[in-house]
Structures are given as C-alpha cells and as structure tokens.
Image (cartoon, rainbow, N blue to C red):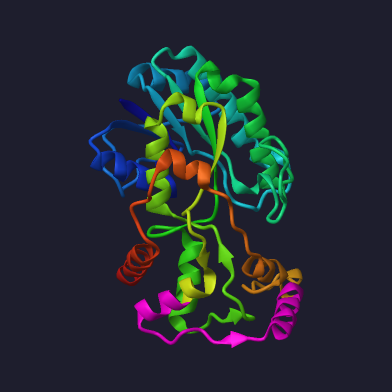
Amino acid sequence: MKILVTGSSGFIGRWLGNLLDEKNIVWAGMDTRKKCEHHQCKIHYQIDFSNSDQLMKALNEFQPEVVVHLAARCDLKGKTLEDYKVNQNGVKTLCEAIRKTRSIKRSIFTSSQLVCKIGYVPKDEEDFCPPNIYGASKVCTEKIVRCLGGGMKEWCITRPTTVWGPNMGAHYRKFLEFIHKGYYFHSGEGALYKSYSYVQNIAYQYYKLCFADKKSIHQKVFYLADYEPISLREQINGYADLMGVKKPYTIPLIFCYGIAATGDALNFLGVPFPYNSFRLKNIRTEYIYDLSETKKVCGELPFSFEDALNKTSEWFLNSK
C-alpha cells in the first residue's frame, strides 16, 4: 500500500512518517514547508494546497491508495474565518483531486475536538458548537468533506484532542521550562483529568485507520486520544520527578483568580504575561471523551503514560 501524508512536516506528521518507515510502508510527504528532518521521507512534495495543478501533478506521480490529510492552520490567533481559508480551500481542492485520482481508495480527514466547546455534548456527529474561529474553520472543513463525499471514495474524519510529546512546538517547550525552573504552580486542588493524545499513540491510531476494513471506518467520525484520561497534576509532577526538580506547589484557587485578573490587565496593556483567565480556565476544565469506537478500530496503544512521560522528559533535557 502507498500512503500520502499531508502536513508531513508538522508535529503529528513527523511521527506518523517515522512509524510508516518502521513498518516499511511506501509513503510520500506533502507540505507547504520543506521536508522534515525528523524522519527519512524519501518522497516529498512541497506545494500550495490551494493550487489544484500542483496537487494533481503530485497525486498522478505518486499514485497513493490512502491519503491522510493532516495539513492545516492550527493556531488560535485568527480573528475571522477568512484567516483560516487555507483550511477550507485545502480540503475542497483535495476532495476534488481525490475524485480524479483513480488509485486513491481511502482518505482520512483531520478535524479537531474544537468543533465543539469543552463540556458541550453534541446530539450527533453533525451537531457543532465551536468555541473559537479555528474551531469554526474545522466545522467548515467537515461540512465540505460530507458535501463532496470525501472525493467519492472511502473516508472518515478524525478529531484529535490536545497532542503532546517529543518535538512539540515552542509553546509546549516553554511549559516544560516553567516546570524545570520551578516557575510552574498547580492552580488549586484536584487531579484534573483530560483526554490527551500522546503523539506516538495518535500516529499509531492514524496508521490503524489506514488499514481498517471499510465497514468500520467509512463516513464515521473518530475522536483520537489515549483511551485512559490522564491527570494533569500527575503529569506535571511526573515531569518534575524525571527532571530532578521539586514538584510544583499548589496555590489556592481564590488566589489564582487574582493572579489571572492581573494577567488579563497586563495583557490588555500589551505586556506579555503567561497566566490569565483564559489559561486558568483551560487548566481547570476537565474533559473525557468516549473513545470506545476508536479503540474497536485501532486496538491497544503501544505507549503507556509512563513511557510517554519518560520519552518527553528525555527529549526536553537532551534538547536544552
């Protein structure tokens, strides 16, 4: 089987590429950026996803059987849907190209958990309640996939949760730096359980979706995360232990609200301050997804929570 991975230079794409190499799968990467240095991608297409001619040329040359579409603008800085038009236009162009490429049998389109705000319980897979513009852009891409029938081939949609692990971006590295330097503190009491995705596990889930039988995946939506939610407190304390530093202390929640309000005021004045009401809400909000359908298709995951902590801590310490 030949697999095309869009967004292959991104965080998940890098690890999926590594896994496909390990499995001796013939695959090609496609991205707006140059080939990622973290995997041995032998075939790489650097293209503009809104350019149908570039896309068709690459598909006709490589002739993939499966397309894993990861490429997207994923930050939360956009102010309007127009700022995320690359997401909508990219999916539309890709669906049209898939329809024209006879070799393609299946496509996996990546959406986001943020098509619904945390805590909202949708009535069905097409009930949306995005909390921000990025989430709204992903709602649009899901609707495009359904409208165009995924290019009239087998298709499914994935909704990854928060993904963590080695080689994550600058924001996550700063979070680990805060723990390492003793700046981080727990915001109130509680374990704070969340359905997070360790990056090598989510790469494995994508791999399994590529090979699952049609009946189990076609026209379905899968949340992707580790099956057991993790405790944010346990994760952070685990990092501290592995880094050889003191575990963060706990500040009573009432004082956290005061610190967050101060951060809001400083941010309003243009002063960068990492702790504000938005950050506090993110920390304190628990979310646990029902991943039973994902587990039926993808099976047990290869890396435990302890494995993930060790690998991420080792990466951080070695990259300092």
Q: Residues in magenta? A: 237-265
Expressed as whole percent of the image width and height from the top left, the position of residue 112 reads 59, 45
Q: Is residue 79 above or below residue 149?
A: below
Expressed as whole percent of the image width and height from the top left, the position of residue 54 reads 46, 22
At horizontal 74% and vertical 45% (from top left) the residue drawn is: 129
Q: Say whether residue 279 is left or right of residue 45.
A: right
Expressed as whole percent of the image width and height from the top left, the position of residue 264 reads 74, 72
Q: Is residue 243 above or below residue 230?
A: below
Judge whether residue 228 is colored magenta.
Answer: no
Q: Say whether residue 291 is left or right of residue 62.
A: right
Q: Nearer the viewer, residue 111 or 317?
A: 111
Q: Is residue 85 above or below residue 214?
A: below
Q: Quadrant of residue 208?
A: top left
Q: Quadrant of residue 19?
A: top left
Q: Nearer the viewer, residue 196 or 95?
A: 196
Q: Nearer the viewer, residue 291 or 79?
A: 291
Q: Is residue 136 above or below residue 51?
A: below
At horizontal 52% and vertical 24% (from top left) the residue drawn is: 94
Judge whether residue 258 is colored magenta.
Answer: yes
